[in-house]
Structure formats: C-alpha cells, structure tokens
Amino acid sequence: MIQILEVVQGGGDKISASASQRRESDRACSLAISIAGAFFDKKEDEISSPSRSSAAACEARHIAIYLAHVVFQQPHRSIAAAFARDRTSITHALRRVEDRRDDVKFDALLCRMERLAASCRDQLNHHSIDEGVAQ
C-alpha cells in the first residue's frame, strides 16, 4: 500500500500504481489458492484452472475466492481477473461458502484457513512496510 501511494504521490503515472495493485491482488489470490490447496490436497493449477474441475477442486477454488475477498480484502473484479472468471462466478462462490458456514465442521475448517490467511496477510503487510522504510 505504501509503495502504491509513493508512486502516485511521487508524480509517477497511474499505470504504475495500477500495475502495482494488480501484483498485490495476484499475490493475495495466489496465497489464497495455496492455502486452499494445502488444506484440500489439491494442486494450485487445478484450483486456478479456468476450465471445469472436480467437485473437490471446485470447493477449494470457492474457498480460495472467499479467502481472497474476506481476508485479503480483494474486490470482486480483481479476484475475477486472477481466477479467470467473471464477477458473477465470484459472487456465486462467495455465497456458496457463506451458506455452508452453518455446518460446524466446515466452519471450524474455514476458521483455521482464515487464521492462516490473516497471518500471511499480516506478514506481507509488515514486509511491505519494512521495504518502504528501507527505500
């Protein structure tokens, strides 16, 4: 975030800021995919595949989308681009995950993934701040 502000405030063009935001969004979505893949024992390329997948890969993708949105605070448009889906598919995935939160076991699993994702997010934010100070 600091780097994006520096580009815009330092007279840099908005294209650079946009590219930086895209990299941040891609990194957040990649982390969400990695976390879902680890918990569901699915390969990252299977989760992020733009084509139809197995039910297990689809579930992992929905959860990765959920983590990208809820924990990493990515907007639907950025998530759609990262997952090669349209925004309505992102909305559908988010709704599916939210609807399953009434299941105690599923909610406990999702809470563990959210905590891991939040820890990763905090480390990334801390690292970004350190890089900004070092420059």
Image (cartoon, rainbow, N blue to C red):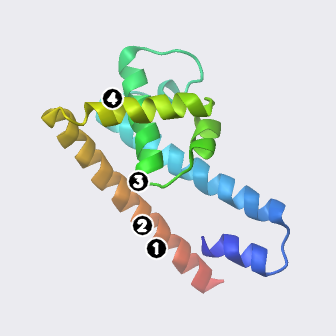
Q: Nearer the viewer, mark 1 or mark 4?
A: 1
What residue did someone put label 1 on? 126
For the point 38% across and 36% down, the residue is: 63
Q: Nearer the viewer, mark 3 or mark 1?
A: 3
Q: Which residue occupies the foreground of this view, 42 or 84?
A: 84
For the point 15% across and 34% down, the residue is: 105
User: Reading the chain from its start, which is encountered first: label 4 or label 2?
Assistant: 4
Q: Is residue 59 above or below residue 133?
A: above
- Quadrant, the C terminus: bottom right
Tell me the amino acid under the disc marked 4. Asp
Tell me the amino acid under the disc marked 1. His
Q: Are marks 4 and 2 in contact (CB under 8 Å)?
A: no
- Crowding at mark 1 (Cα within 10 Å: few <14, some 14-19, many 20+): few
Q: Position of residue 74 (x, y in %)?
A: 53, 51
Q: Is residue 119 above or below residue 58?
A: below
Q: How far is the residue under mark 1 from the one under mark 2?
A: 5 Å
Q: Are marks 1 and 2 in contact (CB under 8 Å)?
A: yes
Tell me the amino acid under the disc marked 3. Val
What residue did someone put label 2 on? 123
